[in-house]
Amino acid sequence: MQSCSSTLSKLSSQIKQWGLELGFADIGITHTDLSAYEAAHFNWIGENFHGEMDYMQRHGTKRTRPTELEPGTASIISVRLNYLDLAAYSPFETLHNSEQAYISRYALGKDYHKLMRKRLQQLATKIAEQVPEFSYRAFCDSAPVLERPIAEQAGLGFIGKNSLIIHPRAGSWFFLGELYTNLPLPADAPFEKQGCGPCTACIDECPTQAIVGNAVVDARRCISYLTIEYSGSIPEEFRAKMGNRIYGCDDCQLVCPWNKFTEQTQEAAFSPNQSLDNVSLLELWTWQESDFLKRFEGSPIRRIGYLQWKRNLAIAIGNIDSDVDTIEKSMAALQQQKATLDLLVNEHIDWAIKQLNDKLAHLLAIKNTKTSRPANFEPLDLTNQKSTQTIKPFVARKYYLPKPTNN
């Protein structure tokens, strides 16, 4: 028995070394007992916080009981892979320029699903070379798996108030993946204490107030859900709050103090698509469906489809807050494409045009109001003169990311 235990311990160390050699940022191992998380998961489902993501409830306890999903599973190998490219155009400047398109940082490069599964397969192959009776199943957002609880139990970080896994030395900008295995590997120590303390920056900053409790997110209010998972008419109460976010939302991560320790990705596949890094909303609006399909080959964005993409863009264009010429140009661009799109997109175009028309009327009213000032004083226009260092979050105190390193 002692020899077997020693062998498994040695194998566990080898697995972690192989994982690092393959490019994973961290590897942890845990058991299959997720009972501590089961009640919270089903309470979340019971509150309908999953919205229209029916797959979250479809498989019942298979998500919370790994041995039901994959019989024979004895332990789970959990991995994380960094995805943030710190050399990309500033997310802060993009968010605060209403004419630019903000896309969640994870989607700027290639689709991570294939890369992660391939990397997990490579790790499994190495294990199988040493353990002939080894059996496994690899996952990366591809089955009913409680990724974040598994990662927390495997010691890869704690579940933060924004519901994401946060590592005290690496932040939260990483993907998770798992290998369910038949090997009774020794489990690593879990993270047992949440490291958020009294901080509520993510809760305060969330544009739609989707974080409704400690680590509890109401997906129906979440911009990531609304722009990616939800294909219907976006409730009007959220449209203006979406700002220029056309695919996903990173606000809760951008204000998280732990992300000052963010690690630069080492994966070239996650380098930003040049079509998306610092691009205007009106430029993206000109894309035809053929452009959308071609430019997003290998991108996670492609899966939402062209019409949902246009719906998101229409809302963002309606939120442009600029000068008279830009607003008039935006209204014309929206109106020009109405005949080529479906009723759902047109509904959002009509909303956007009304928003822009109200702003235009306000600007023209100001322009026509002559105010006399001593010495014809005119205030300085500081628009677009903010540096990354001086840009502040919309509500929270500060943004947190390390400065890009010059290679």
Image: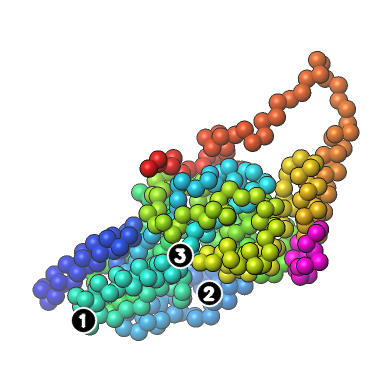
Q: Position of residue 174 (x, y in %)?
A: 42, 57
Which comes sooner in the sequence, label 1 or label 2? 2
Element at label 2: helix
Which residue is label 1 attached to?
132
The span from disc 1 to disc 2 (Cα, nearest Å) is 35 Å
Which comes sooner in the sequence, label 1 or label 3? 3
Element at label 3: helix
167 or 120, which lies in front?
Answer: 120
Mark 3 residue crowding within 10 angstroms, few (<14) / some (14–19) / many (20+) = many
Q: Position of residue 171 (x, y in %)?
A: 41, 51
Highlighted magenta segment, given as a residue range: 335-348
Using residue 29 as the reference point, say whether residue 374 is left or right of it.
Answer: right
Q: Quadrant of the N terminus?
A: bottom left
User: Farthest residue toward the left?
Assistant: 3
Image mark for residue 56: 2
Q: Position of residue 371 (x, y in %)?
A: 86, 25
What residue sits 37% from the left and 42% below the top?
A: 407
Which residue is label 3 attached to?
112
In which image quadrant can residue 118 be found? Answer: bottom left
Question: Total number of numbered labels?
Answer: 3
Q: Position of residue 53 (x, y in %)?
A: 58, 73
What residue sits 65% from the left and 50% below the top?
A: 280
Q: Is 38 one of the magenta-colored residues?
A: no
Q: Is 337 one of the magenta-colored residues?
A: yes
